[in-house]
């Protein structure tokens, strides 16, 4: 961020905070193919504080919610007692930094998936994550404060299949294995279940952990109304275990421990077969997103991260074949 933008940002933050804010340090955090996160060290009314500014990258995914919506979700989650960074300020305008942004309090801990799966020694973190997901699922429609989520789907399973098929059709690249997977989902879809707020990217790599404690659940830009088992399946999908395949709960613990903690906190028994349906759905969804990110790179949004992400599509297709009993 150049110096004029940084000066405008400091002025805007001072007005939003109702007190003079000086930015002492500002650094772009690693990761963030979809969004940018900037670490801000500031002083407000003379006292030091540590914040994070979250804003758009140059190109964003069409299914990603805008920053104003993500800020509203953080507010709703924070009010519901979910472990999230405290949301502070939101700017919907582009004039300050060139894109809408919001500011939240910075939280300590480890987010990197490859580190977390090496540190996990028992089921305690998986159990804590099960409880945290149960807290998220207490947010249910109708919610007038979350109008951007639209009407809840009548059948989250059918809605998922239709959305993925539409995305594949729009891309125009033949993906027969993914189409096969979607047909398998269509033929094996369970009946509709209760609709709750899905984080929709609840996985290792998208939370901050301090030991066995969940310090914060991050990255809410894909949240939507849906079936609770969609989040459970996304978390348990092999593609999000970071190589620790034997630890089926996000690479950090046993599936049974994760299920039990979720059920105890939510009061709702986990239906394993529904989770498996959504694990296959998660694998297909991630393959569709990875292919889309490769397409962004080829269309001019040149990025090594985007280009490399597209290379996982064949591995995900093999997972689809295994999960449908073909390979």
Image (cartoon, helix red, strand yellow):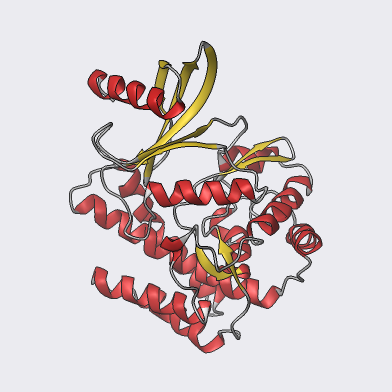
Q: Position of residue 255 (x, y in %)?
A: 73, 60
Asked if residue 92 lies left or right of residue 191, the reply is left
The answer to whether one can see residue 314 in this image is: no
Q: Is residue 122 visible?
A: yes
Q: Picture quarter containing residue 143?
A: bottom right
- Observer-nearest residue: 240 or 89? 89
Residue 263 placement (x, y as % from top left): 77, 64
Viewer-side residue, 6 vs 172:
6
Q: Residue at the spot x=50%, y=27% of the render?
A: 51
Q: Quadrant of the N terminus?
A: top left
Which of the pair 204/263 is nearer the observer? 263
Residue placed most toward the observer, 272 or 150: 150
In the rendered image, residue 30, in percent from the top left (x then y), is placed at 43, 33
Lateral position of residue 11 relative to residue 282, left or right: left
Residue plotted at (57% across, 71% down): 278
Percent across and percent down for residue 48 are: 54, 15
Image height check: is 274 above or below 23?
below
Query: In the current view of this chain or complex, which residue is farthest to the front?
Result: 18
Count of labels shown?
0
Figure check: 1 above or below 155: above
220 on left or right of 5: right
Residue positioned most to the bottom: 187
Residue at 32% over, 48% down: 306
Specify the quadrant of the image occupied by residue 8.
top left
Which residue is drawn at the image coordinates 60% and 37% (left, top)? 115
- Residue at the top extreme of this rendering: 46
Image quarter for residue 236?
bottom right
């Amino acid at each position: 961020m150049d110096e004029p933008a940084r000066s405008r940002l400091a002025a805007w933050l001072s007005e939003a905070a109702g007190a003079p804010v000086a930015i002492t340090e500002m650094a772009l955090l690693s990761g963030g193919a979809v969004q940018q996160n900037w670490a801000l060290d500031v002083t407000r009314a003379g006292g030091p504080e540590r914040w994070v500014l979250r804003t758009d990258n140059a190109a964003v995914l069409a299914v990603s919610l805008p920053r104003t919506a993500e800020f509203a979700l953080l507010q709703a989650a924070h009010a519901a007692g979910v472990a999230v960074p405290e949301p502070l300020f939101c700017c919907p305008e582009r004039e300050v930094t060139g894109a809408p942004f919001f500011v939240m309090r910075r939280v300590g801990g480890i987010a990197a998936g490859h580190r977390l799966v090496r540190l996990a020694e028992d089921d305690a973190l998986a159990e804590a994550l099960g409880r945290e997901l149960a807290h998220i699922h207490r947010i249910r429609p109708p919610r007038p404060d979350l109008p951007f989520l639209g009407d809840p789907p009548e059948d989250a399973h059918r809605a998922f299949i239709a959305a993925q098929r539409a995305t594949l059709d729009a891309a125009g690249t033949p993906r027969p294995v993914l189409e096969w997977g979607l047909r398998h989902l269509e033929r094996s879809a369970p009946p509709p279940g209760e609709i709750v707020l899905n984080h929709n990217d609840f996985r290792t790599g998208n939370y901050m952990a301090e030991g066995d404690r969940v310090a914060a659940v991050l990255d809410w830009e894909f949240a939507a109304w849906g079936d609770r088992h969609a989040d459970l399946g996304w978390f348990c999908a092999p593609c999000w275990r970071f190589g620790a395949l034997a630890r089926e709960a996000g690479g950090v613990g046993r599936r049974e421990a994760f299920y039990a903690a979720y059920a105890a906190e939510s009061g709702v028994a986990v239906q394993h077969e529904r989770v498996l349906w959504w694990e296959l759905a998660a694998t297909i969804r991630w393959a569709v997103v990875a292919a889309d990110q490769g397409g962004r790179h080829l269309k001019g949004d040149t990025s090594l991260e985007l280009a490399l992400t597209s290379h996982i599509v064949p591995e995900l297709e093999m997972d689809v074949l295994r999960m449908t009993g073909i390979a």
